[in-house]
Image (cartoon, rainbow, N blue to C red):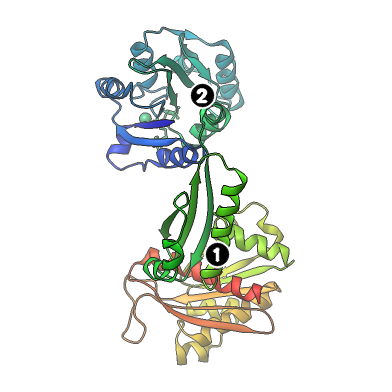
Amino acid sequence: MQALIITIGDELLIGQTIDTNSAWMGQELNKLGIWVIERIAISDDKNHIIDTLEKNKNRADVILITGGLGPTKDDLTKHVLCEYFGGELIINDEILQHVTEIFSRRNLPMLEVNRQQAMMPNNCKALFNKLGTASGMQWQIPFADKVGQQFIISMPGVPFEMKYIMQTHVLPMLQGLSNTQVHHRTLVTAGIGESFLANKIKDWEEALPPQIKLAYLPAIGMVKLRLTTRGNLNETLEVALDKEFEALKILVKDYLFADNDEPLELTIGNLLLQNKATLSVAESCTGGFIASKIVSIAGSSKYFDGGVVSYSYRAKENLLGVNNQTLQTFGAVSEECVTEMCKGVLQKFNSTYGIAVSGIAGTDGGTDDKPVGTVWIAVGTANKIVAKKYLFSKDRFRNIELTYVYALKMLMEEIKK
Ligand code: ATP
Ligand code: MG
């Protein structure tokens, strides 16, 4: 099965909004074994929308469209699609009731343009949107030159509304139609570059059976390795996939962060939970980034005590008890300082593990012996603290993210000890 994605909105073309919708849809379709042949971004323009539909009407089994379903004049998609498929807009009572309820819940008057949100083309299937006023629409038309039907599905541009409609209506429908399946095994490595990793696993990679493909997916401070096989997962194929995955895990064991595709903060959270341990963080150069990542996981209150953002010397002294002498002698970006920060945060929060980071994120502030990108990270418990120095990059945001990845990697090593 093949799919094509069309995202509509002037804001996408001028880069004001980044098209995250098609990235997410691509991932979800891939899981169902549906191949995305093309992603197209176009403007809120009637002719442009019609042209794009005309050019693509026989090219894929499903065309997924997002954007332009709002109540304002610049949102044209519903009207254009309705006209294109020769339908007529009529009130849908269920949607009208839903839209009315939304406005009364918010204590807002309902305008005529809002009522129009309940107008649906009479020749499509309405895909009810519990989370917003713009419903999705689904047309099913025969292919002109091949057997079967083409689905054309239009959804709102707001990412969480699009995801809701995809998850409740579209993906279950497509799952029923797709006859191939894609199976993945993914692991996350941290602390080794892509080319070194490739070199390490070269022999194993060359010997992979042809039905199993390997992909390198580099991100900041990490490389994900994904094994994929397509087709009905019979026992032989599954055994082969798992065998290769286990072999790969052993080859990269020194850099292995997780043997699944979860975010790092979730893996760490689960590890802390399993060990009935708690964490606190003392952050200088990351300014709360680590704490914010940790609390992005629901249920993190079970293992995260809290953190201190100690940016200045004064904050390091007053909030974490770092010695003024230490700061004067070694500076804030030093083994001595992060070790004292870590000790301080462990005492303050009485947690099992502490993390402390201090570095020169950039873009200025570097010196010859401590250039931009120099970061000290300390991790430990009340009994023992280890500190390491890193030299990351020249880019401020990269340095903040790299500090976060390496701090979590050090913490993982400590917990596993
Ligand atoms: P609404 O009913 O909210 O008006 P809509 O279908 O008209 O929905 P748009 O007006 O096109 O949607 O976009 C609504 C919001 O969703 C905007 O903030 C827009 O930037 C964002 N958005 C639109 N398309 C995308 C996309 N492809 N990826 C990420 N965000 C998007
Ligand atoms: Mg729009």
Q: Is residue 83 above or below residue 300?
A: above
Q: Position of residue 25 (x, y in %)?
A: 45, 37
Q: Position of residue 17 (x, y in %)?
A: 36, 41
Q: Is residue 416 above or below residue 106?
A: below
Q: Position of residue 255 (x, y in %)?
A: 51, 70
Point out which mark residue 133 bears. 2
Residue type at tag 1: Ala
Give the SS element for disc 1.
helix
- The C terminus, quarter of image: bottom right
Point out which mark residue 247 bears. 1
Q: Is 313 or 281 nearer to us in this picture?
A: 281
How crowded is the residue under tag 1: few (<14 C-alpha within 10 Å), some, or many (20+)? few
Give the SS element for disc 2.
loop
- Could one spot residue 76 in this view of the protein? yes
| Among the 4 quarters of the image, the one containing residue 416 | bottom right
- How far, Cα to Cα, is label 2 from label 1? 50 Å
Q: Is 47 or 231 nearer to us in this picture?
A: 231
Q: Is 405 or 328 nearer to us in this picture?
A: 405
Residue type at tag 2: Thr
Ligand 2 in which quarter? top left
Q: First in sequence: mark 2 or mark 1?
A: 2
Point out which mark residue 272 bears. none
- The residue that appears at 53% across and 29% down in the rendered structure is 165
- The N terminus, quarter of image: top left
| Among the 4 quarters of the image, the one containing residue 306 | bottom right
Label 2 near ligand 1 (CB < 8 Å)? yes
Disc 2 to disc 1: CB gap under 8 Å: no
- The residue that appears at 58% across and 24% down in the rendered structure is 102
